[in-house]
Amino acid sequence: MAALRLGSLCRALTRPSNLALVQRGLAISAVDMKKVIPLPDPLEHAVGIEKIEKLAKLQGIDDPFDLKLRKRGEGSKENPDLVPSIFNKRIIGHICEEDQTHITWFYLYKGHPKRCQCGHWFKLVEAQPL
């Protein structure tokens, strides 16, 4: 019985002449923003390699892992290109010619200058850690 009454009420309200009677209530509440909560510092949440990079950037070091390309110098046996490393060996990638499409990779050991297949000399020198 109640369903019949509800159905007839809905049909009566949805007639074009009665649509003006149907209104929807809207409640608006103001948000209280008296207390400003600051965002946390990203350095506090960083861990691992990300934290090392952020700390190095604060110290002014833009390449903490020494991965940027270097201009090659003379590269002779008497004046080899110096490659810094905190370890006893380091892998070197050398592009022998400007238009070369591959990289020549080889290990460089501390105290032993090494010649690339193109004739360029490299020497590993000690570097200070961060």
Image (tube, rainbow, N blue to C red):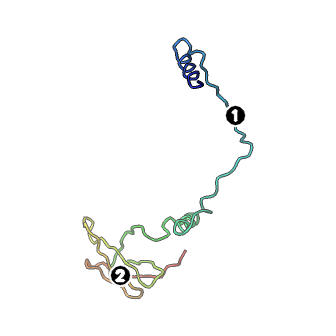
Reply above or below: 22 against 64: above
Q: Where does the image place residue 49, in percent across and percent down from the top left?
A: 51, 68
Lower position in the chain sequence, tag 1 or tag 2: 1
Q: Where does the image place residue 51, in percent across and percent down from the top left?
A: 56, 66
In-front residue for pair 63/20: 20
Which residue of the protein is positioned furthest toward the front in this rendering?
1
Q: Which residue is mark 1?
A: 29
Local SS, label 2 = strand
Find the distance from the CA under tag 1 to the CA under tag 2: 68 Å
Reply above or below: 58 against 130: above
Question: Dividing the image into 4 quarters, which one contains the N terminus?
Answer: top right
Q: Where does the image place residue 105, in percent across and percent down from the top left?
A: 31, 76
Q: Which residue is mark 2?
A: 107
Question: Dividing the image into 4 quarters, which one contains the C terminus?
Answer: bottom right
Q: Quadrant of residue 116?
A: bottom left
Q: Amino acid at mark 2?
A: Tyr
Disc 1 packing (10 Å; few <14; some 14–19; many ≥20)? few
Which residue of the protein is positioned furthest toward the right in this rendering?
34
Q: Residue at x 50, y 64 (%)?
A: 62
- Count of numbered circles on the image: 2
Is residue 15 found left or right of 116 in the rendered image?
right
- Between disc 1 and disc 2, the foreground one is 1
Reply above or below: 51 against 113: above
Disc 2 packing (10 Å; few <14; some 14–19; many ≥20)? few
Q: Residue at x 45, y 82 (%)?
A: 125
Q: Amino acid at mark 1?
A: Ser
Q: Where does the image place residue 67, in percent across and percent down from the top left?
A: 42, 69
In-front residue for pair 80/60: 60
Q: Residue at x 25, y 66 (%)?
A: 101
Q: Residue at x 41, y 78 (%)?
A: 82
